[in-house]
Amino acid sequence: TSQIRYFEFYDLAPIGYYTLDTNGLIIDVNMTGATFLEVEKNELINRPLTRFIAPDSRKKFSNHIKRIIDSGTNQQCEIEIIKNESPVYVHIESKAFFDENWNIKEILITAIDITERKNTENERLESEEFLKNIVENIPNMIFIKSADKLNFEMVNKAGEELMGHSREELIGKTDYDFFPKDKADFF
């Protein structure tokens, strides 16, 4: 019964579990962790986890492991792994286990697939950048003012040209800083 419970709890958890030795080799992995990497569980044993981490994330992962060892505390980060040559984003949390002499024994890593969230986040950022470029390059003055003090918070390129001041000079100021009182009152 204990073995069945252990199997269900560990192997079938919706979180990937990886246990690494002091050389970064996988010494244990659950089924979810193997599924993330699309490699049979038994084929992962004694292989370096870094082999499956995207080249752009390897330094970040290395620094993550270093922080765990140096601080002795749990650490988290987001990295990209390669799955069928497609990126998969995972949020990892890691903990080092030490022996009685404070030598590192092993590192336990939990991984949660956040690919959908990352893709949505990237699409949102691309949309924001696209809209920002439209606003910036439209030939009419576009600005945003705060509701309470009516100071400029954003001005596009046409606004800079029309007002005759740089964005840096305009942001945080009000119409009273640039126009006579009667015109500023009107604006």
Image (cartoon, rainbow, N blue to C red):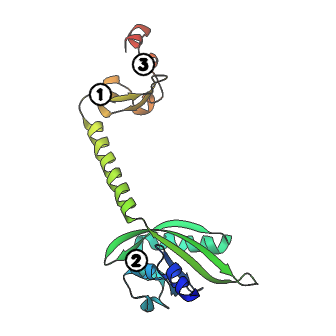
- Asked where in the image residue 118 lies, by quadrant, the reply is bottom left
Q: Is residue 32 left or right of residue 139?
A: right
Along the viewing direction, whichever of 52 and 172 lies nearer the viewer: 52
Residue 89 percent across, percent down from the top left: 41, 68
Q: Which residue is mark 1?
A: 141
Q: Residue furthest left?
A: 139
Which residue sits at x=66%, y=69%?
73
Of mark 2 and mark 1, the one earlier in the sequence is: 2
Mark 2 nearby-residue class (10 Å; few <14, some 14–19, many ≥20): many
Q: Quadrant of the C terminus?
A: top left
Q: Position of residue 66 (x, y in %)?
A: 60, 73
Q: Is residue 42 visible?
A: yes
Q: Residue at x 48, y 90 (%)?
A: 45
Question: Callout 1: 10 Å neighbours few (<14), some, many (20+)?
Answer: some
Residue 158, image x, y percentages: 29, 30
- Sequence-wise, which precedes: disc 2 or disc 3? 2
Where 130 sits versus 108, above or below?
above
Nearer-N-terminus badge (3/1): 1
Q: Which residue is mark 2?
A: 36
Secondary-structure class at tag 3: helix
Q: Amino acid at mark 2?
A: Phe
Residue 25 seen in this snapshot: no
C-alpha span from label 2 to label 3:
56 Å
Residue lying at 36% horizontally and 82% vertically, measured from the top left: 38
* Residue assigned mark 3: 175
Q: Amino acid at mark 1?
A: Met
